[in-house]
Amino acid sequence: MASTREFSAGGIVIRDAEGRLEVAVIRPAGKSVTALPKGHIDPGEDAAQAATREVEEETGLIAKLEGKLGDVKYVYRWRGNTIFKEVAFFLFRYQSGQIDVLTEQMRKEVDRAYWLPLDEALTRLTYPGEREMATRARTLLIASR
């Protein structure tokens, strides 16, 4: 059995909605999970560029990169192969755009994008590594208020 390494990047997009911090989350197509926008790093891109692109493609939002939050590493199996995955996560501030206004192409990947209060995201995000990134973002944002 083969093993493969995969590298992806994603983002936590934050907006201040009348004093309450919200995060942009997605429900990937055909899945019943709450997740952060993320995807593969394309040739010629660095992780920050990939995260910026994925955020826009999967949520419909334009966001300003604030900085790196950290990496999430995990292992999964796909068609008999072991995949070692590393996802670089970045913190973004919402700039413009309307959430969930996606291209027909992106609808194949994302069923829904929506705002979720950051405090709720700490428990409602499906994946432990993404909950950890949301916790880091919250800690940073509270410290900077």
Image (tube, rainbow, N blue to C red):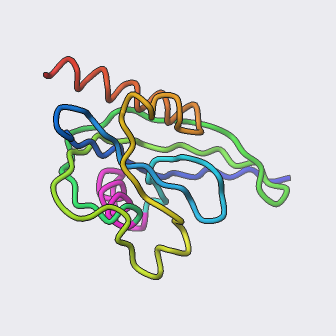
Question: Vertical placement of 102 versus 72: above or below?
Answer: below
Q: Nearer the viewer, residue 82 or 65?
A: 65
Name the side, left or right, on which 45 lies relative to 87. left
Residue depicted at x 58% and y 31%: 128
Quadrant the C terminus occupies: top left
Residue depicted at x 53% and y 38%: 125
Residue furthest top in the image? 143
Residue depicted at x 34% and y 33%: 69
The percent coordinates of residue 35 (x first, y second) are 51, 47
Residue furthest bottom in the image? 104
Q: Nearer the viewer, residue 20 or 67?
A: 20
The percent coordinates of residue 48 (x first, y second) are 30, 51
The percent coordinates of residue 10 (x first, y second) are 41, 49
Residue depicted at x 58% and y 52%: 6
Q: State yes or no: residue 90 in magenta.
A: no
Q: Nearer the viewer, residue 74 or 61?
A: 61
Q: State yes or no: residue 54 in magenta.
A: yes
Question: Vertical placement of 24 versus 144: above or below?
Answer: below
The percent coordinates of residue 98 (x first, y second) are 26, 64
Question: Vertical placement of 114 versus 85: above or below?
Answer: below
In the rendered structure, which segment of residues is drawn in magenta? 42-57
